[in-house]
Image (spheres, rainbow, N blue to C red):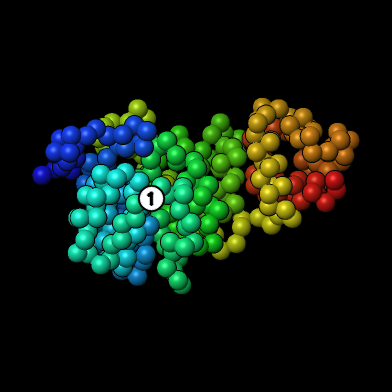
Amino acid sequence: MTLLNQVKTFLRTNRIHPKKQLGQHFLINEEVLSIIIDAGEVSETDVVIEIGTGLGFLTTELANFAGRVIGVEVDSILYEELDSQFADDSSVEIIHKDFLELDLPLLIPTDTYPKVIANLPYAITTPILWKLLEHSDYLGCCVLMMQREVAERIVASPGGKDYGALTIGISYHADTQLIGTLSADNFYPEPKVESALVRMSMLDTPRVTVVDESFFFRLVRESFRGRRKMLKNSLKRFAPSDKLTEILSSLDILPQRRPETLDITEFAAIANLLCTNI
């Protein structure tokens, strides 16, 4: 039976429909499952966390390769199906919980750096990404299916329309790679957007050194609220104009540049000088 037929049979048997509020779009292309496993370089020594286990198609593949799989599923009906499906597999644990409400460090086995491999619910992709980044010290790599537009923002280069605060936030913690894109017909029901598979490899230490991490991220977010403004205008809330011009000049950064043209190193340099001079 194809994955699509399995999904339709399950929905029909349980007299339910995919829940839009949970962003349920079931992956129905078996070949993509292999691509995900390969991208995660999953081996028997790995602990893998899967966010949104759905009907367990990816979970089953992960269990064939990983030493342990921890699946998180918020939907009660899907959880009951998964709990029954993997009841006799000691290597798979299914948790009935909203991932955003989980205390992630408590979920992680001692002395392990789990890989996170998942087809993310579209509606909460960005909150999940930020939660993973907040706990990057506990994780290895992440292989995540998401909306194509979010994926393109993650891997964007300075100067492009997709480059922004999310790009820098992830770059601070991880190396990123766009594995590939998928059309809507790889899912059921078909989403209204294309999808993409991204690999994020967590860094041992942040990409840049900053004096105050919270200040750095606040400055980056504020900069991109006016991405088409010149730096001297988008950063004016952080320092008087003359002081800001002095700091930018000392870094050989023209005050007329726009935030979207700066790389993470330049943002870090600005944040460090502003933080110590205000």
Q: In the displayed orientation, state which residue is furthest to the bottom.
A: 111
The residue lying toward the viewer, choosing from 10 and 59, is: 10
Q: Is the residue 131 above or below the residue 239 in the image?
A: below
Name, please, the residue furthest toward the left. 1
The spot of residue 267 in percent (x, y) is 70, 45
Write down the residue under mark 1. 97
Q: Amino acid at mark 1?
A: Lys
Percent position of residue 110, x then y: 45, 71
Left or right: 58 in relation to 167: left
Residue at 21% x, 49% y is 81
152 and 59: which one is in front? 59
In the current view of this chain or complex, which residue is farthest to the right? 242
Determine whether 124 is above or below 117 in the image.
Answer: above
Count of labels shown?
1
Picture quadrant of residue 235 = top right
Question: Is residue 200 toward the left or the right of residue 241 in the image?
Answer: left
Question: Which residue is at a point 27% across and 54% down the rendered structure image?
Answer: 59
- Image coords of residue 31 (percent x, y): 23, 47
Q: Position of residue 201 (x, y in %)?
A: 48, 56
Q: Residue at x 22, y 64 (%)?
A: 89
Pointer 1 local density, CA inside 10 Å: few below 14, some 14–19, many at least 20: some
Quadrant (top left/top right/bottom left/bottom right) for the N terminus: top left
Helix, strand or loop at disc 1? loop
Closer-to-camera residue (196/187): 187
- Residue at 53%, 57% (x, y): give it: 135
Image vertical order of residue 46 relative to residue 77, above or below: below
Residue 38 visible in rendering: no
In which image quadrant can residue 189 be found?
top left
Residue 207 visible to the viewer: yes
- Give the side of residue 56 with respect to residue 42, left or right: left
Residue sitting nearer the eye, 136 or 252: 136
